[in-house]
Image (cartoon, rainbow, N blue to C red):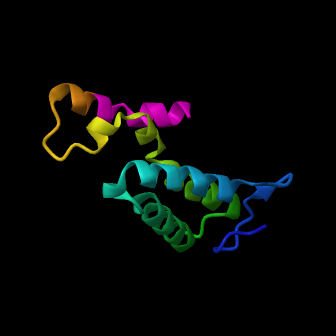
Amino acid sequence: MKNESGFELCRNGIDYHEIIECIVSALDAKDPYTAGHSQRVSDMALALSGFLKLDREETERIHIAAHLHDIGKIGVPDAVLNKPDRLSHDEWAAMKKHPQTGAQI
């Protein structure tokens, strides 16, 4: 199966693009302030990969990584993620851990 850009993201009967979109949807629901951000980043990464004429496999890896680049925010407490005011030092430290959390996911 190919995604909207023509890249195959389905292997062994598993549609990875669909799984990734579900995960990103969960993040969008958790953080409505940045909802759609991961999709926009992945769209830009896909366009840039095409502009750079990267091969299909590299483009696919970049596209997936762009979708998932903020997934670690799922591990940030809602009180921190959705706080309308300036974050405290400790809250900001918790927010800065999201890339590490994402790498673990």
Q: Position of residue 75 (x, y in %)?
A: 43, 34
Q: Is residue 11 above or below residue 83?
A: below
Q: Is residue 24 visible?
A: yes
User: Which residue is painted at 85% across and 55% down in the image?
Assistant: 13
Look at the picture and state if 104 lies above or below 44.
above
Place of residue 3 in the rendered image (x, y in percent of width and height, measured from the top left): 68, 69
Expressed as whole percent of the image width and height from the top left, the position of residue 33 reads 30, 56
**Which corner quadrant holds the C terminus?**
top right
Based on the picture, tell me whether residue 38 belongs to the magenta stretch: no
Q: Residue at x 17, y 37 (%)?
A: 87
Q: Quadrant of residue 74?
A: top left
Residue 65 in view:
no
99 falls in the magenta region: yes
Vertical placement of residue 43 versus 10, above or below: below
Q: Left or right: where does residue 71 sit relative to residue 82?
A: right
Closer-to-camera residue (102/29): 29
Q: Nearer the viewer, residue 105 or 42?
A: 105
Question: Bounds of the magenta span?
Answer: 94-105
The residue drawn where x is 22% and y is 43% is 83
Which one is in front, 29 or 37?
29
* Tally of marks: 0
| Left or right relative to 89: residue 38 | right
Q: Quadrant of the N terminus?
A: bottom right
Farthest right residue in view: 12
